Image: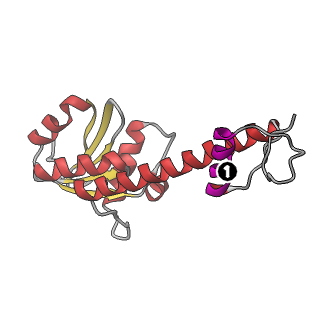
């Protein structure tokens, strides 16, 4: 059995799949590994090239494997798909990753630092909150429209809805008040 020179790692939530080849391209490792034993497995493996499909958790595993002395390269999943030979499952995905990482024309994704990932998390969280605020505002406007209260879109309309909610209810016949509740 030869020494592993290149391995493909298909990461998942609980069980990872490893596919390793030696210098001549012969398969040396084809193994399922639990999350808890993954670092232990790669610590016992001599330093080699490890390919992983790029996803948020791939950056974490890439950093961890680099600390163990391995060379880690992340690839976009759409680029790896071309190397998938048969049906899509973890073992075949790992084999495709292993083959794709050795291609000279392959494009790689740089491994993000913890600080870079933290900044991205903050931006995504803010984006989610803004989107949810807009959804809530639109839902409230829609519900109030069912009661005859119509307001403008956006933050101005939301503020008008809140002002109406706080103020006294009036009839739609009141000409001095633009936004009123229908009786």
Magenta segment main secondary structure: helix
Q: Nearer the viewer, residue 137 or 178?
A: 178
Residue under the image location 35 percent in, 49 percent down: 56
Residue under the image location 69 percent in, 43 percent down: 164
Q: Quadrant of the C terminus?
A: top right
Is the residue 58 above or below the residue 103 in the image? above
The image quarter in which residue 32 lies: top left
- The answer to whether residue 2 shows anywhere in this view is yes
- Left or right: 180 with respect to 99? right
Region in magenta: 155-167
Percent x, y of residue 82: 49, 56
Residue 22 is a magenta residue: no
Percent x, y of residue 99: 35, 54
Is the residue 138 above or below the residue 147 in the image? below
Is the residue 105 above or below the residue 20 in the image? below
The residue where tag 1 is placed is 160
Percent x, y of residue 144: 75, 39
Residue under the image location 33 percent in, 29 percent down: 14
- The answer to whether residue 113 shows anywhere in this view is no
Percent x, y of residue 129: 49, 47
Residue furthest to the bottom in view is: 105
Residue under the image location 21 percent in, 29 percent down: 36
Residue 162 is a magenta residue: yes
Q: Quadrant of the N terminus?
A: top left
Q: Nearer the viewer, residue 74 or 167?
A: 167
Q: Nearer the viewer, residue 103 or 68?
A: 68
SS at mark 1?
helix
Residue furthest to the right in view is: 173
Mark 1, other Cα within 10 Å: few <14 / some 14–19 / many ≥20: some
Q: How many marks?
A: 1
């Amino acid at each position: 059995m030869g020494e592993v020179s290149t391995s493909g790692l298909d990461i998942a939530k609980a069980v990872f799949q490893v596919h390793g080849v030696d210098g001549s391209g012969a398969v040396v490792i084809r193994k399922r590994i639990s999350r808890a034993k993954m670092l232990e497995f790669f610590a016992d493996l001599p330093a080699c090239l490890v390919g992983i499909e790029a996803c948020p958790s791939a950056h974490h595993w890439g950093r961890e494997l680099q600390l163990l002395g391995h060379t880690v390269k992340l690839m976009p999943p759409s680029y790896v798909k071309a190397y998938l030979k048969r049906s899509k499952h973890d073992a075949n995905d790992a084999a495709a990753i292993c083959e794709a990482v050795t291609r000279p024309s392959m494009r790689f994704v740089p491994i993000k630092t913890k600080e870079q990932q933290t900044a991205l998390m903050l931006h995504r969280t803010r984006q989610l909150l803004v989107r949810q605020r807009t959804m809530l505002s639109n839902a409230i406007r829609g519900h109030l429209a069912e009661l005859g209260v119509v307001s403008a879109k956006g933050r101005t309309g939301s503020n008008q809805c809140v002002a109406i909610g706080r103020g006294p209810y009036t009839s739609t016949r009141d000409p001095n008040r633009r936004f009123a509740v229908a009786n």
